[in-house]
């Protein structure tokens, strides 16, 4: 979870971080609009007012939308009514509702992009959105209905409904009418959208960015947990440490690879189990941990850069640039201008989310291979079949691997890229779209699956260490490696001890689903990584000397 010392976030449109998003989404963190942005917001608003007053053609303000952009609305009343119509007409999404934390992140991101002052909306609209965030009035947004350009149109229309006292919300763990929830917190439910505000609220990438930001935040914790888990598996099979030597990785200096190898060295320091087996070298799922985990970590770094850029970007359309004589535009013209473009297009995020999904899926793939290695007496360096004292009578952890295999197979389907797909909308005006929200939702599902896979590997690795530490007995010791006993390293022992507080060793068959859930929650809550980092220091902090 994000640090508990977050008390408030000040929105300026320029300084929002992924940690801020997680903090507002998951904690009681309050949001405030920076007073410094009010001048810029009002300058862009003046362009809208001037266009309406002078009956100037301005897309989405005095014209229709999409295919209807050529329809001019001369009547100012019609121009204002258009903004509510765009919300009403976009209420077409389907499927389960987005998680409450995602909805809160969506609202935060929309407020932040409007705060940059290029959207032509009133400050009171942004403040109203912030008030809903702080009151924890969360719109119910169906998850399916966005093609990722012009942004997340339909989902963002659902986000907008409560602003005008309409739609359903989740408030104090109950679903109710927005009007009822607003009255409970003494917010006037009667609020009308003004010129440009409907399109400003719906044109943007806030849904895909919100899902992506929270998925990235969790993925960064998960990859550390996977390194910890892999180190336990390395010790369980008495693996060879030369594969993790710093010299080896310096001659192929990918940062992620070097950092992962450094993590493993930290975690196994002090272990008497490593290098004690009679194998010449280990299988790829052990020997190539730095190369595989490190590649996924570097993919996460690319995703981080994309998300951090988008968090503080303007993804509305059209954009309104208000210039003054002190800050003229590059062409030297001192005037107020509007620009119609495509900043709402989710392609950068779509590619990044597909990459995130693939990077996570690969981590699940190699984790499942280590599970199988630990369970197979022919490849586990002397551990008993399925990691149980009495194999045959007991199945041990055998069937847990089936679940991991199912999740890995599902991930392979989910990892198929959405970013290469497009389908025309709006009578071919919007003829190339990003599918970025689909890519983000897929990445999040892959993350959930990988958490469960890693939880199963942790169960197997801690059970294997029980045999190596003599806490469980290996019945058949024909393999000389069966006689190897010892203790884990400082970091891995810390992880082992934490797991054993929540899950007992498996001495005979029992239901294992709750064990998997318990370990998964240790990963999800960051308890595992924080406990281990207390012992070994920060993971992924490698300094290339």
Image: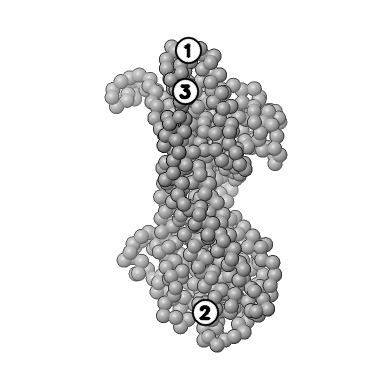
> Which x, y percent locates residue 284?
43, 70
Could you tell me how far apart the alpha carbons at marks 3 and 2 are, in whole angstroms? 68 Å
Quadrant including the C terminus: bottom left
> Which x, y percent locates residue 114?
49, 30
Residue 259, relative to residue 315: is it above or below?
below
The residue under label 3 is 68
Toward the viewer: 545 or 202? 202
User: Residue reaching furthest left?
Assistant: 331
- On residue 74, the disc is 1
Which one is earlier in the sequence, the residue at label 2 or at label 1?
1
Task: Tell me whether circle 2 and circle 1 mark residues in contact (CB < 8 Å).
Answer: no
Which one is earlier in the sequence, the residue at label 3 or at label 2?
3
Task: Tell me whether circle 1 and circle 3 mark residues in contact (CB < 8 Å).
Answer: no
Which one is earlier in the sequence, the residue at label 1 or at label 3?
3
User: Which element type, helix, strand or loop, lies under badge 1?
Assistant: loop
Could you tell me how far apart the alpha carbons at marks 2 and 1 are, in whole angstroms? 80 Å
Could you tell me how far apart the alpha carbons at marks 1 and 3 are, in whole angstroms? 14 Å
Instruction: Kindly tell me whether residue 455 is visible in this rendering.
Output: no
Mark 3: give few (<14), some (14-19) or many (20+) Cα within 10 Å: some
User: Which element type, helix, strand or loop, lies under badge 2?
Assistant: loop
User: Which element type, helix, strand or loop, lies under badge 3?
Assistant: helix
Residue 164, relative to residue 538: is it above or below?
above
Instruction: Kindly tell me whether residue 190 is visible in this rendering.
Output: yes
Left or right position of 95 against 307: right
- Tell me the residue at 53%/15% (across/down): 78
- Tell me the residue at 70%/37% (across/down): 175
- On residue 220, the disc is none
Toward the viewer: 63 or 44? 63
- Tell me the residue at 66%/24% (across/down): 188
């Amino acid at each position: 979870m994000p640090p508990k010392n977050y008390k408030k976030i000040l929105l300026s449109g320029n300084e929002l971080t992924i940690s801020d998003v997680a903090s507002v989404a998951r904690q009681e963190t309050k949001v405030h609009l920076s007073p410094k942005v009010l001048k810029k917001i009002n300058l862009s608003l003046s362009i809208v007012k001037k266009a309406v007053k002078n009956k100037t053609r301005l897309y989405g303000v005095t014209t229709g939308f999409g295919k209807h952009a050529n329809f001019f609305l001369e009547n100012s009343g019609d121009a204002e009514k258009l903004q509510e119509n765009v919300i009403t007409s976009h209420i077409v999404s389907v499927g389960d509702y987005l998680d409450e934390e995602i909805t809160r992140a969506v609202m935060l991101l929309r407020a932040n992009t409007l705060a940059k002052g290029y959207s032509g909306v009133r400050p009171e609209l942004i403040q109203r959105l912030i008030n809903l965030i702080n009151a924890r009035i969360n719109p119910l947004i169906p998850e399916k209905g966005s093609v990722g350009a012009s942004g997340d149109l339909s989902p963002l229309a659902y986000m907008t409904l409560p602003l005008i006292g309409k739609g359903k919300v989740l408030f104090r763990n109950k679903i109710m009418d927005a009007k009822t929830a607003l009255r409970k917190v003494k917010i006037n439910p009667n609020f009308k959208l003004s010129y440009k505000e409907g399109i400003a609220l719906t044109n943007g990438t806030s849904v895909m960015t919100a899902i992506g930001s929270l998925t990235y935040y969790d993925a960064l914790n998960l990859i550390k947990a996977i390194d910890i888990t892999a180190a336990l598996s390395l010790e369980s099979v008495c693996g060879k440490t030369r594969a993790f030597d710093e010299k080896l990785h310096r001659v192929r200096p990918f940062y992620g690879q070097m950092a992962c190898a450094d993590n493993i060295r930290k975690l196994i320091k002090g272990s008497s189990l490593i290098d004690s087996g009679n194998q010449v070298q280990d299988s790829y799922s052990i020997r190539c941990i730095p190369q595989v985990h490190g590649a996924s970590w570097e993919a996460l770094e690319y995703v981080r850069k994309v998300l951090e850029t988008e968090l503080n970007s303007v993804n509305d359309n059209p954009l309104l640039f208000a210039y003054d004589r002190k800050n003229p535009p590059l062409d030297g013209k001192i005037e107020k201008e509007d620009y119609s473009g495509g900043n709402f297009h989710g392609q950068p995020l779509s590619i990044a989310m597909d990459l995130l999904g693939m990077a996570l899926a690969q981590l699940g793939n190699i984790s499942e291979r280590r599970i199988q290695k630990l369970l197979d007496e022919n490849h586990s360096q002397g551990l008993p079949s399925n990691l149980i004292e009495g194999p045959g009578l007991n199945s041990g952890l055998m069937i847990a691997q089936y679940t991991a295999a199912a999740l890995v197979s599902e991930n392979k389907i989910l990892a198929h890229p959405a970013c290469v797909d497009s389908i025309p909308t709006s009578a071919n005006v919007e003829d190339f779209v990003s599918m970025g929200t689909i890519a983000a939702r897929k990445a999040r599902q892959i993350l959930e699956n990988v958490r469960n896979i890693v939880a199963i590997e942790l169960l197997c690795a801690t059970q294997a260490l029980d045999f190596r530490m003599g806490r469980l007995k290996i019945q058949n010791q024909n393999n000389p490696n069966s006689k190897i006993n010892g203790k884990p390293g400082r970091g891995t022992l810390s992880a082992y001890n934490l797991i054993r507080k929540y899950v007992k060793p498996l001495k005979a068959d029992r239901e294992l689903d709750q064990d998997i859930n318990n370990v998964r929650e240790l990963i999800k809550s960051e308890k595992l990584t924080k406990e281990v980092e207390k012992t070994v220091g920060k993971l992924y902090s490698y300094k290339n000397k």
